Image: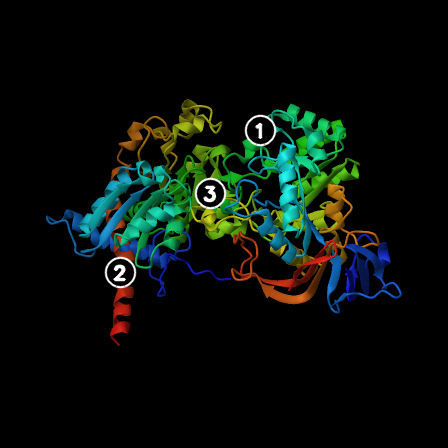
Amino acid sequence: MNKRNIQLDDNNRLRHFLSIEGLKRHILTDILDTAESLSGVTQQTVKKVPLLRGKTVVNLFFEASTRTRTTFELAAKRLSADVLNINLATSATSKGETLLDTLRNLEAMHCDMFVVRHVNSGAAHFIASHAAPHISIINAGDGRHAHPTQAMLDMFTIRRAKGEFYKLKVAIVGDIEHSRVARSQIHALSTLGVEEIRIISPATLVPACCETLGVHVYHDMRQGLEDVDVVIMLRLQNERMETALLPSEHEYYRLYGLTEEKLALAKPDAIIMHPGPINRGVEIDSQVADGPRSVILEQVTHGIAVRMAVMSMAMQSHLADAHSSALESSE
Amino acid sequence: MKFSIRNGRIINPASPGNQRDTIGDIAIDNGRIIAVGKLPSGFSAEREIDASNLIVCPGLIDLRAHLREPGQEHKATISSESRAAASAGITTLCCPPDTQPIIDTPAVATLIHDQAANAGLTHVLPLGALTQNLAGKQLSEMAALKDAGCVGVSNAMRPMADYQVARRALQYAATHGLSVFIHAEDPALSNQGCAHEGAVATRLGLPGIPSAAETVAVASYLALIEATGARAHFCMLTTASAVTQVARARYDGLPVSADVSAHHLHLTELDVLDFDSQCHVRPPLRTQRDCDALRQGLADGTLSAICSDHQPHENDAKLSPFSTTAAGISGLETLLPLSLKLCEDSNMDIVDVISRLTTGPADILGIEAGKLASGHAADICIFDPEQYWTLSLDNIVSRGHNSPFLNWELKGKVTHTLLNGKITYEA
């Protein structure tokens, strides 16, 4: 049985953006190229293009977020869309309304795009498979599953710094098991064809059968960093200490915290990335985070262009649909 | 009323070797079988079923079906699910004690018996709660539950407080000659998981339930069974390693048995890809290697029964993100065809397959059922082994429409079901 990828329309254009997995390289490259062409908008005096004019984008955040929600909002506004922010972490769902009912209510308000963040893995897929056909869904993070726009802004940042992907060795350091960012990065890096993806983490934070994702697992950070071009640090949640996954912040930092001394093992021009918010002194030393090789703030800037690219591409698929159905009905 | 079933292929796993699979007739009088093979001379039936090209076997016994009554009648009722069972050739259902209220008093057991008798379509045998309120702390009044018709005791899917309570419960159940039905799952290891901890859960970011949640519990319970000598049954094993442990224990002579669900014989973790909530079950679907080991364990008799683990749900229960959906499959109507599929998929002998649905579960429950013999109640299933059909929303009988097997082409369709010599289903 060959199930259709619900992210794509009949012409294999992006219709929803739910996960990197299942998308071909040319689509990822398209996103990066579109983001490149849109990144100029941010530097203009009038920071707007009319690609989403007259469209309504709803930020549906079932889980708290500042950075991601803000950059999505900025991206939508720079595309001239109307933006509605709904913080559902404190709203109807806590009153017992089902996700499907929330969805039906918002559909009834004739919105065009939902940017969804949810605590449960698969929530964006669920919404996309039940939403009315005219609505595009952008996944802004679902459980531990995926955070595809974060991964694409990371790819954008890597491409800006390094050019081609195929020669790169990339290390992802930290709590892979609980990270939707890491999962999406791994799929993006392997689809874009990097030479090697490394995971650096203690066994308690490496997901089961991780090697099936096409990564090499290192428990020793010094070995893992040797000769890499890109170091991606992940945020460590405090609760990992409470659930017998790690003994202490102190030991974690000693073994897996990124310091100048450990970084010296990577290539001299290696870049340092972090999806934020960073825990200084837990997973990364301030000197490294603020140092010349850190591109952490560039990542944030690039987030806007990449999200503009994804939103405009997904909306184009719907506009094309509407256009062709209008043609059909006029015939 | 006198009944005859003519010219059927009679598969009766309880018969001695060469008579387990024969062509012949069955005579029924006053709800009981009076002859198998040839009709008694001068027997004149008021009704005759022509079973040419059909298989006639004992009515199927399903070790595990949630009927949702009392307590969750919005999902299903004993009456609605009895009808589904009859349409699937099932004449005996065993239901776990996690109803609302829980089957920890004779009154609830009696209620279930009464409702089943009112429906009159299938026997329903309740399991009593192993501990009060299934809380895993205090023993239930097992003797009273036995008197009220409970055929065994179980803590369903609820955890025991500790192994001391489990040990005492095994001892006390043994005192009253009750088998303990164990769901082997260590709650700390399964934690908040909703899918097998492996490649698929890793990909989908779903919290995993490691195989160790089952194997640790099986090992611990086997040690307690050895220490107490209590008779115990493992419900729905899912891992290769647990099957090996049970095979070893049986070889060593421990009084244990085990079953497997029909869906674990056909689905694996891969079916969860795309977040298909119809494949959200507990214990979870595991790897192909586990699935192969379950089939092997079923063929060699380590697993002596196939159950449906029937869990009917209303549609909404499956309409949310995967981990928040209710676990379970509406499984009565696929029990027989999925079992028969093993003849083709795994080269299993059809008599052995039928035995896992009749004599196997009857032995586990310690009941006189699951055989075609003179003097026995005429609980009989007749099916066409060659008929292809498709389970669909239009033809599913159960109130629960939650099945990953919807739109599967299935082979083997029940044509008649008899309960105590009365036709309860006719296609």
Check disc 3 and report the residue beneath it. Answer: B323
- Most extreme residue toward the bottom, as rendered? A331
Residue nearest the observer in this picture, B268 or A56: A56
> Does residue B12 appear to the left or right of A267 in the view shown?
right
What's the residue type where badge 3 is placed? Answer: Ser
Residues tagged by mark 2 and mark 3 found on one chain of the structure: no
Residue nearest the observer in this picture, A243 or A249: A243
Which callout, 2 or 1, points to the residue nearer the camera? 1
Give yes or no for contact between labels 2 and 1 (Cβ–Cβ under 8 Å): no
Tag on residue B22? none
- Please rate how many residues cluster around mark 2, counting C-alpha atoms within 10 Å: few if below 14, some from 14 to 19, many from 20: some
Secondary structure category for the residue under label 3:
helix
Give yes or no for contact between labels 3 and 1 (Cβ–Cβ under 8 Å): no
Tag on residue B135? 1
Secondary structure category for the residue under label 2:
helix
Q: Is residue A243 above or below residue A40?
A: above
Which callout, 3 or 1, points to the residue nearer the camera? 1
- Please rate how many residues cluster around mark 1, counting C-alpha atoms within 10 Å: few if below 14, some from 14 to 19, many from 20: some
Q: Is residue B167 above or below residue A151?
A: above
Which callout, 2 or 3, points to the residue nearer the camera? 3
Residue nearest the observer in this picture, B63 or B255: B63
The answer to whether one can see residue A215 in this image is: no
Tag on residue A316? 2
* Residue under the point 51% across and 41% down: B194
Q: Quadrant of residue B145?
A: top right
> Does residue A88 appear to the left or right of B403 in the view shown?
left
What's the residue type where badge 1 is placed? Answer: Ala
